[in-house]
């Protein structure tokens, strides 16, 4: 950005001193998420609708635990706390 500003308007900024002026103008630092060029969103969505429920059901029926990224459980506290409810510190003495 510093180079672009200097080329376009002839004003020099050190790259580390640009955050405040740009922030005042409403800009913020964003980096694009890396994404494969070959990604096919329609194919992914079809897989999630068609194949994922079958795979997930098979994992659950086999008795294996689903990896954390597959579970929709929010934990509030340590891993041993019961899922889906807030962890009460007073309960920790009983464990």
Image (cartoon, rainbow, N blue to C red):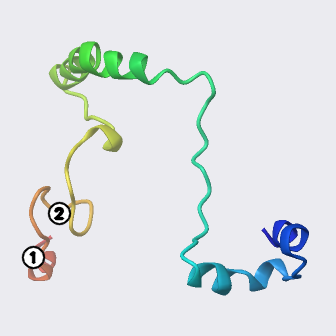
Label 2: which residue? Answer: 81
Q: Quadrant of residue 56?
A: top left
Which of the two discs, 1 and 2, labels the residue nearer the N terminus?
Answer: 2
Q: Residues within 10 Å of mark 1 (few under 14, many from 20)?
A: few
From the top left corner, tell me how far across and down residue 73 is, in percent. 19, 50
**Quick check: 52 above or below 76?**
above
**Quick check: 63 above or below 2?**
above
From the top left corner, tell me how far across and down residue 13 is, in percent. 84, 82
Q: Quadrant of residue 9?
A: bottom right
The number of numbered discs placed on residues in the rendered structure image is 2
**Quick check: 86 above or below 73?**
below
Label of residue 15 in the image: none
From the top left corner, tell me how far across and down residue 12 is, in percent. 89, 82
**Are the residues tagged 1 and 2 within 8 Å (C-beta)?**
yes
Query: Which residue is drawn at the image coordinates 66% and 85% (left, top)?
Result: 21
- Name the residue nearer the viewer: 72 or 10: 10
Which type of secondary structure does the marked residue at label 1 adopt?
Answer: helix
**Quick check: 72 above or below 61?**
below
Q: Residues within 10 Å of mark 2 (few under 14, many from 20)?
A: some
Label of residue 91 in the image: 1
19 relative to 43 in the view: left or right = right
- Distance from label 1 to label 2 (Cα)? 9 Å
Which type of secondary structure does the marked residue at label 2 adopt?
Answer: loop
77 relative to 3 in the view: left or right = left
Q: Quadrant of residue 50?
A: top left
- Name the residue nearer the viewer: 30 or 3: 3
46 relative to 94 in the view: left or right = right
Query: Which residue is drawn at the image coordinates 11% and 69% (left, top)?
Result: 86
Q: Quadrant of the C terminus?
A: bottom left
């Amino acid at each position: 950005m510093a180079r672009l500003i200097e080329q376009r308007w002839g004003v020099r900024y050190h790259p580390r001193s640009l955050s405040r002026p740009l922030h005042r103008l409403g800009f913020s630092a964003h980096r694009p998420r890396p994404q494969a060029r070959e990604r096919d969103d329609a194919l992914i969505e079809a897989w999630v609708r068609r194949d994922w429920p079958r795979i997930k059901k098979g994992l659950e029926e086999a008795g294996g635990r689903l990896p954390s990224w597959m579970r929709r459980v929010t934990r509030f506290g340590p891993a041993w706390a019961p899922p889906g409810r807030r962890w009460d510190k007073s309960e920790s003495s009983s464990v």
